Image (cartoon, rainbow, N blue to C red):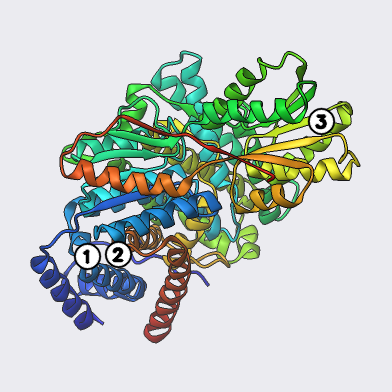
Amino acid sequence: MSRILIKSLATGAFVLAAGAAWADGIGASLLTQQHPFYIEIANAMTAEAEAREVDLEISIANQDLSKQLADVEDFIVKGVDVLVISPVDSQGVLPAILKAQQAGIEVITVDVPAQGVEVTSYVGTDNYTGGVKAAELMGEVLGGEGKVAIIDYPTVQSVVSRIEGFKKGLEDFPGIEIVAQQTGITRAEALATAQNMLQANPEITGIFGFGDDAALAAAVAVKSAGLEEQVRVIGFDGMEEARNAVDTDPVMVGVIQQFPDQMGKIAVETALKVASGEAVPAEQPIVPGVYTKE
Amino acid sequence: MNQTPATTSRPTLDRSARQDLFRSMLRQYGGILLALLVLCIFFSVANPRFMSVANFMNVFQQVAVIAIAAFGMTWVILLGEIDLSVGSIIAVAGMVGAQMFALGWGFAPALLVTLLTGAVMGLVNGMLTAKLLLPSFIVTVATMSIYRGMVSLPTNGAPAMITDPTWTAIGANAFLGLPIIIWIVVALFLVNHIALSRTTFGRKTYLTGGNREAALYSGIKVDRMKIVIFMISGLMAAISGILLSSRLYSAQTNAGMSYELDAIAAAVLGGTSLAGGVGTMVGTLIGALIIGALNNGMNMMSVPYFYQLIVKGLVIIVAVWLDVRSKRKNA
């Protein structure tokens, strides 16, 4: 046993002495890989990095801020040039970003902005404008009259902006009244929320879900309440499942479509510009589109 | 029955005694140390930066939260019990601290209340287990859910920022060139190690875990012992929670999710028997380092996340097998 120990120690020392070429390139810390939106961001980043022949490594924080910090610390030790990060939590990401910046690494945030610290650039959907567009669609679909409910997620800044934009947009339609606003984060929760809201306010004619999950759940709730003729649902995100629902489901009248592929591509482009010393804008908002039935 | 740690009987160490000590250390930890060493060498070959002082400190800091919770878990497992609520207590501790600061409390009182909260949560686990005679597995599955729910009450699920400079300094600053977190882990390791290997309380723990009947007949108050040990586990979890929230400058409601499983894995990797009565703090510390080295090393190798989960599980199985095998061979 002890001979093995000594031998392995010797190998270790050799390896220690031989070490030289450190990795350069881009490190990306994404908050999850269990959502199609983030899978598209990751795929777009990988594709762009391959096209530009640059090293890109992606770590998945799995919604755990502690893991995100550890991932960033590991990137620092590895010595990446630029850190692309989609924070698990806008505020809680602060120590991770500070550590990277102290190590001389430029930081670019994607999708979710960081609060309390300045980063080199932020690439993300213009959620407020998206919310306004959702309101315009809602007003059009309902003919300017009706009662609307909102399914929200109040602790996420991007969702708060969507809801703010939606409410601002509805101000142009004085005939539309918001009668309920409740939280439904996962699809299961959103389903219960939508059912409760329809139970409490049977006169609802429109539901805005903060994300695809919320909207798809709302559409199910509308059908199970037998209100297909009365209620119209609009979502936000516009991933494939929701777009298909818009194509086939009469209740789902439209979805605000984010462009994760653009987001991932621009993030890598920006990282490369930063690495070569080029100036980049501090904010790069991506205006979402509106996906409706043809 | 139970295996008394090598260090309990040590008058003056002459040469042969020292050799004996070395041999028994090797017998006890040889397998698991070998596993750690193999991992380190493998990762160093894959990325030479793995074997650097900076990265060693990195791993140590990342594993601190698990290691401390695992110290508490070791006590519980030694007694033949289990504590699945530590992950939730970790989150509660951070949130309690954050709320104390939000109320304008200073560092010392906030720290005290946080530690007390952990101890009380452990007390509840212990009382339910010892007095109502419920299996600790079920009790702590239940309190895991209860404590996790309580975390979200003050902020309605949102994270709470912590700006107290002393609290955040714990996670960010260094003392004499070593991060404060590492000092804390080392100090807590020594306290737990000495309490377990050099005190009557420690010996009683081994005895009770190894043979409950014998312990009862020899006059050990097993109930009180259980309660105290669950309180130790709660206290350790609270300290872990303080470190985690200081590293993150914030209390997250999902903090520490499933850390109880990592803590159990660390203890078992370190040779702690789930049947009770066998295990040491040294082993648990090595076990925690293996988990930390694994997470960090696979990141350094850029292993995709989902493969990391698979590899982590496989390595735990192989490491425990190596350990069991080497003990069987040396026995």
Q: Position of residue A75 (x, y in %)?
A: 27, 51
Along the horizontal axis of the image, is A213 left or right of A92?
Answer: right
Q: Position of residue B297 (x, y in %)?
A: 31, 62
Q: Are marks 1 and 2 in contact (CB under 8 Å)?
A: yes
Q: Residue at x 88, y 38 (%)?
A: A229
Secondary structure type for disc 2: loop
Q: Position of residue A200 (x, y in %)?
A: 87, 27
Query: Where B159 falls versus B38 (above or below)?
Result: above
- Camera sees residue B116: no
Instruction: Check disc 2: other Cα within 10 Å, few if <14, some if 14-19, many if 20+.
Output: some
Q: Position of residue B307 (x, y in %)?
A: 44, 67
Q: Tell which residue pokes out farthest to the right in this image.
A: A226
Q: Chain of mark 3?
A: A
Reading the image, the residue beneath label 1 is B47
C-alpha distance separating marks 1 and 2 = 6 Å
- Foreground disc of the pair 3, 1: 3
Q: Chain of mark 1?
A: B
Q: Chain of mark 2?
A: B
Along the horizontal axis of the image, is B147 left or right of A74?
Answer: right
Whether discs 1 and 2 lie on one chain: the answer is yes
Q: Amino acid at mark 1?
A: Asn
Q: Earlier in the sequence, mark 1 or mark 2?
A: 1
